[in-house]
Amino acid sequence: MKIAILIGTSGLVGMQLLHQLLQNPVYDYVLSIGRRKLSLKHGKLIQISGDMNTINSWDLDSKLSDQDLGGENHGIRVAIKENTAAIHAFSALGTTIKQAGSKDNFIAVDHGMVLQFAHCAKKLGAKKFLNVSALSADANSKVFYNKVKGKLEEDLKGIGFEYVGIFRPSLLMGNRSPARLGEEFAKLVTKPFIWLKLFKKMRPIYDYQVAKSMVIKALEVNSPAVEIIESDAMQDLTK
């Protein structure tokens, strides 16, 4: 049995990732975790909601049991308890300082929540962790956003997964709601680079390309312990 567990499903890449995982026949269950449930139903989708600030202390089996009125979750509960499933964890969670309201709140989401989720996934038995980072992520950067993303990358490497995939997309193309004014302007300026096939690493990349790359890498065998997948490599993977 293969189980995908993910956070950030309401976001741009997260929604694409959720659809990719649901459509992929390799995964038997897709477990989506968030503050609230999405208005989406699928035969192999299980949604769990709660306080994301305390995710590492959740009793996941109890949460699965609470909504298991017809016994549909029995298989996944047994597989997790008996450690017989291959579990891949995905994070597409991310915010902005404007949305978060402060730098501290931004750190709490983009670093704290993702790291808590990673520890939770490790306790469940996940062997692989795949995370959406940022193009210029660097723990030593003087740019606050890049520094937080880089610090998260370093901390994920130390948890002990067999594989950590770090995905660093450039400007994301897709239907984000609500739209971000600065991003929309940047898209207008840089979208011609896609048509002209210029500046491959820096030019915009579509949300579905990032999501598809994550699934491809999750299912690869003989992967390195840590792999950084830049935006140009994602474009190559999804030609």
Image (cartoon, helix red, strand yellow):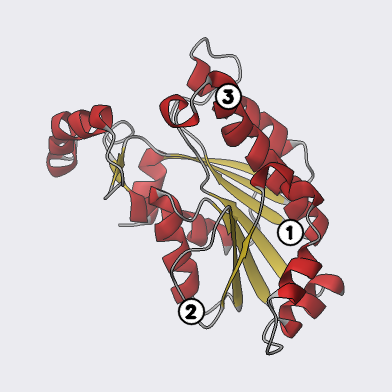
Q: Secondary structure at mark 3?
A: helix
Q: Residue at x 65, y 61 (%)?
A: 88
Query: Marks 3 and 1, how far apart in space?
Result: 24 Å
Given residues 227 and 33, the one toward you in this image is 33
Whole-percent x and y of residue 15? 42, 58
Contact, mark 3 vs mark 1 (Cβ under 8 Å) = no
Q: CA distance from mark 3 to mark 2?
A: 35 Å
Callout 3 amino acid: Val
Q: Which residue is mark 2?
A: 42
Q: Quadrant of the C terminus?
A: bottom left
Q: Nearer the viewer, residue 148 or 217?
A: 148
At label 1, which amino acid type do we have? Ala
Query: Residue 184 is drawn in which quadrant?
Result: top left
Of the two numbered discs 3 and 2 in the rendering, the one whose residue sits closer to the viewer: 2
The first of marks 3 and 1 along the sequence is: 1
Q: Residue at x 42, y 49 (%)?
A: 11
Residue 126 occupies which quadrant of the picture?
bottom right
Q: Is residue 216 above or below residue 129?
A: below
Neighbourhood count class around disc 3 (C-alpha, 10 Å): few under 14, some 14–19, many 20 upward? many
Report x, y in % for residue 120: 76, 51
Q: Examine the rendered structure and indicate whether residue 132 appears above or below residue 189.
A: below
Identified by mark 2, the residue type is His
Residue 72 left/right relative to 228: right
Residue receiving disc 1: 126
Q: Residues within 10 Å of mark 1 (few under 14, many from 20)?
A: many
The residue where tag 3 is placed is: 148
Indicate which disc, 1 or 2, sits on the residue closer to the N terminus.
2
Q: Is residue 161 visible?
A: no
Answer with left or right where residue 177 lies relative to residue 23. left
x 78%, y 55%: residue: 58
